[in-house]
Image (cartoon, rainbow, N blue to C red):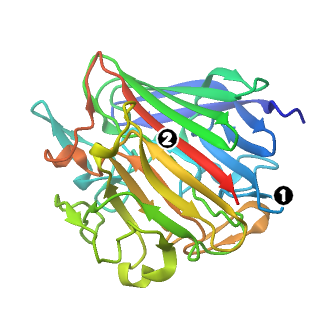
Amino acid sequence: MAAGGAAMRVSFVFLLMATALFGLAASILPLEYFELKKGDFSLKCTNWGGTILSVVLPDSNGKLADIALGYDTSKSLGEYLKNPSSFGALVGRVANRISGAKFSLNGRTYKLFPNDGRNSLHGGHRGFSKVMWDVKEKDLEGPYPFVKFHYHSFDGEQGFPGDLDVFVTYKISGDYQLTVVMEAVPGKKPTPVNLVQHVYWNLGGHDSGTVLGHEVQIFAGHITPVDKELIPTGEIAAVAGTAYDFLEPRRVGSRIAEAGGYDINYVLDPAAAAADGMKRAAVVRDGGGSGRGFELWTNQPGVQFYTSNTLRAVGKGGAAYGPYSGLCLETQGFPDSVNHPQFPSQIVHPGETYLHRMLFKFSVE
């Protein structure tokens, strides 16, 4: 296969029926798979849910491994049609939780579809991870291969106001570098937007066991504490000395029992941003000897650290995924921002463009 990249395409037609609170939309789009490749670093993705299916990286001995959790796609999309854990998916219109599945905007209360108890999670029953995106642009043979997906979310979809055109670009932007760019342009109404890329990482390989031995550093001195439903209380709390303190590198498992597993938003320091708005959010190293690691950079105000605390799934090649089999670092706006005016606003108005950038700098030592 050429180093510049190659595409795998499935040429059957997929009928997408998208239901929402105020209407029904149907579109016919082809399901497509793509491989972006530069040297011995590669990524596979699909336009179903804008999903990253695999990320392959060598270890210190040159042995390749897929470091992203996910399902088999050898015959069909299979479990990705449901994908309850959102493996590799592009999540929205509003990722994370919205308390009571409702919010108010300009004097009107919008009721969403509750799918996490009484709350809305990751955009509702049929968020952006469960729809077919069209392929807007691609270059799979150049030195920096990329694919750009587009989805049109209609007014009232899952209860959210306003039409919204959404784009995600996956690009191998350098040696062992992956850039993810998420954009959203509203139509005639203001609307909340919080898009998230939901890869589960295991740097030892997706089937190598837990990430409890991974070493993590998160460049954030505060978190947004949550209640028993994982809804933010509205506070901003310091992490110093607590089980949530990753200001210095340490193993994921060193205090995980004290925290009851990690599923919390970290507040990134805006003063640490460079001129382009990007700031370093986290560094992860495999503690199992593969030598793999990555730095994560973003322009977003927060990052959700999640350690797959209740995960139970059968993954690629029959791998048994259990609790702590992978970790997520989801750069984002603060959860439930629409119900906490003191949090950074997620409302995007007509004429504005939502822009969310992530840069993964992988390394092998």
Question: Quick check: 128 left or right of 274?
Answer: right
Question: Quick check: 238 left or right of 254?
Answer: left
Residue 62, label in figure? 1
Instruction: Give amino acid for label 2.
Output: Met
Relative height, residue 90 to residue 243 (above, below)? above
When asked about the image quadrant of residue 234, the answer is bottom left
Instruction: Give amino acid for label 1.
Output: Gly
Residue 251, label in figure? none
Relative height, residue 283 to residue 188 (above, below)? below
The reply to whether residue 29 is in sight is: yes
Task: Give the residue drawn at x 50%, y 79%.
Answer: 253
Nearer the observer, 198 or 116: 198
User: In the structure shown, which secondary structural element does the residue marked by tag 1 occupy?
Assistant: loop
Local packing at callout 2 (Cα closer than 10 Å; few below 14, some 14-19, many 20+) is: many
> Which residue bears the numbered disc 2?
358
Quarter of the image where the C terminus is located: bottom right
Question: Quick check: 54 left or right of 225?
Answer: right
Whole-percent x and y of residue 337?
A: 23, 46
Whole-percent x and y of residue 126?
A: 46, 43
When asked about the image quadrant of residue 66, the answer is bottom right
Local packing at callout 1 (Cα closer than 10 Å; few below 14, some 14-19, many 20+) is: few
User: In the structure shown, which secondary structural element does the residue marked by tag 2 occupy?
Assistant: strand
Relative height, residue 92 to residue 100 (above, below)? above
The reply to whether residue 112 is in sight is: no
Nearer the observer, 4 or 127: 4
Whole-percent x and y of residue 353?
A: 35, 23
Task: Give the residue drawn at x 38%, y 65%.
Answer: 247
